[in-house]
Image (cartoon, rainbow, N blue to C red):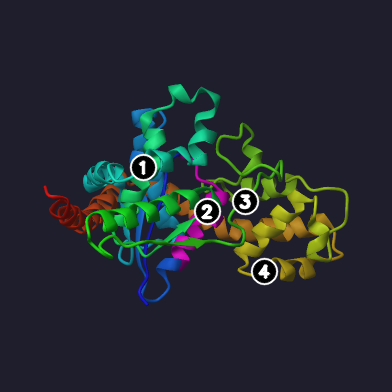
Amino acid sequence: MTKKIFSGVQPSGNLHLGNYIGAIKNFVDLQNQKGNQCVYCVVDLHAITLRQDPKILKENIRETTAAFLASGIDPKKSIIFNQSLVPAHAEGSWILGCVARMGWLNRMTQFKEKAGKDKEKASIGLYIYPILMTADILLYDATHVPVGEDQKQHLELSRDIAQKFNTDFKAPNFLQVPEPLIQKNFSRIMSLKDGTKKMSKSDPSDQSRINLTDTKDQILNKIKKAKTDESPMPDEIGKLEKRPEVENLLGIYSSLNNQNLEKSINEFSGKNFSSFKAVLADLVAENISPISQEIIKLLQNKDYIDKILKEGAEKADKQASQKINEIKKIIGF
């Protein structure tokens, strides 16, 4: 069965190993599976739910696109574009927002987390963000959406909205009800300095993450200095309990080596951390250094990146505008 896949990444800048393992690496794998039709979006409309510097935002859009391309997402196989170039996303968001219910949005935990205690000062965009995400997905008849645990609730909302639209307008199966593709293993890569915190670009310590633009020497140095503990390397999964830093490093190794955690534990059981880190550092550098070099090379040719986005947007717009026109007919416009 052909899978139609949609996913997006916010152009927040400074993408890191967590973004690669948790999302982009999976995007490449899905693209290369026979029969899949993939649409990968730089979701710049989502980015402005928080205030952005216009010049930095433009550069971040290009950097995210460069990371897609450098990691192996192929514009000949997948559609790559930025959201703001396709007007149907904003238009679809308004129409679907009139179908969604306030009670549904009030249950979204991510808004509560991001808005914090002062939610009265949060932007309306941050509150209705899941409606735009719904439009992103439904405009392309996506059958499957790769999501992390933090976005699973939003995907459930998109399913509710699709089903309500189909019922309200007596249009059975018109809007495809998407299924989640949840990456079960290694979807959350943690800080190299604190295994209880997710790897993040906002961490003040650059030593906490492997940036996708880091040099080989930087990668080797960061892995060498990554936090571990005083106990020996574990010989079974059960012994990783309360050892988050060790579990994180073994998870990174397992993901980049395309093997399960058990195999990695068996491989390094009884060895010291210095020998494990040396192997891990080489593996990370082997995978990330070529991506880093390619990102830097691509960013020197902004016209090429803009061309990829423009051509991708033309392909995306063809699908999305057709769907929005069908929606308009159904609702009486």
Instruction: Report how far apart the C-alphas of labels 4 and 3 lie in the structure.
Output: 15 Å
- Crowdedness near tag 1: few (<14), some (14–19) or many (≥20) residues, C-alpha within 10 Å: few
Instruction: Report how far apart the C-alphas of labels 2 and 3 lie in the structure.
Output: 12 Å
Which one is closest to the eye, mark 1 or mark 4?
1
- Crowdedness near tag 3: few (<14), some (14–19) or many (≥20) residues, C-alpha within 10 Å: many
Indicate which disc, 2 or 3, sits on the residue closer to the N terminus.
Answer: 2
Q: Determine if residue 167 is in view.
A: yes
- Residue 327 is drawn in which quadrant? bottom left
Q: Which mark is residue 148?
A: 2
Q: Is residue 221 left or right of residue 178?
A: right
Q: Is residue 301 left or right of residue 210?
A: left
Give the residue at mark 1. Answer: 101
Magenta span covers which residues? 13-29
Asked which secondary structure carries label 2, the reply is loop
Whether pointer 1 and pointer 4 mark residues with C-beta atoms closer than 8 Å, the reply is: no
Instruction: Report how far apart the C-alphas of labels 1 and 4 lie in the structure.
Output: 42 Å
Q: Which mark is residue 260?
A: 4
Give the residue at mark 3. Answer: 189
Is residue 262 depicted above or below 114 in this figure?
A: below
Instruction: Report how far apart the C-alphas of labels 1 and 2 lie in the structure.
Output: 24 Å
- Crowdedness near tag 4: few (<14), some (14–19) or many (≥20) residues, C-alpha within 10 Å: some
Which one is closest to the eye, mark 2 or mark 3?
2
Assign the magenta stretch its main secondary structure.
Answer: helix
Amino acid at the residue labelled 1: Arg
| The stretch drawn in magenta includes residue 113 | no
Asked which secondary structure carries label 3, the reply is loop
Indicate which disc, 2 or 4, sits on the residue closer to the N terminus.
Answer: 2
x, y (%) of residue 251? 67, 59
Which one is closest to the eye, mark 2 or mark 4?
2
Instruction: Report how far apart the C-alphas of labels 2 and 4 lie in the structure.
Output: 19 Å
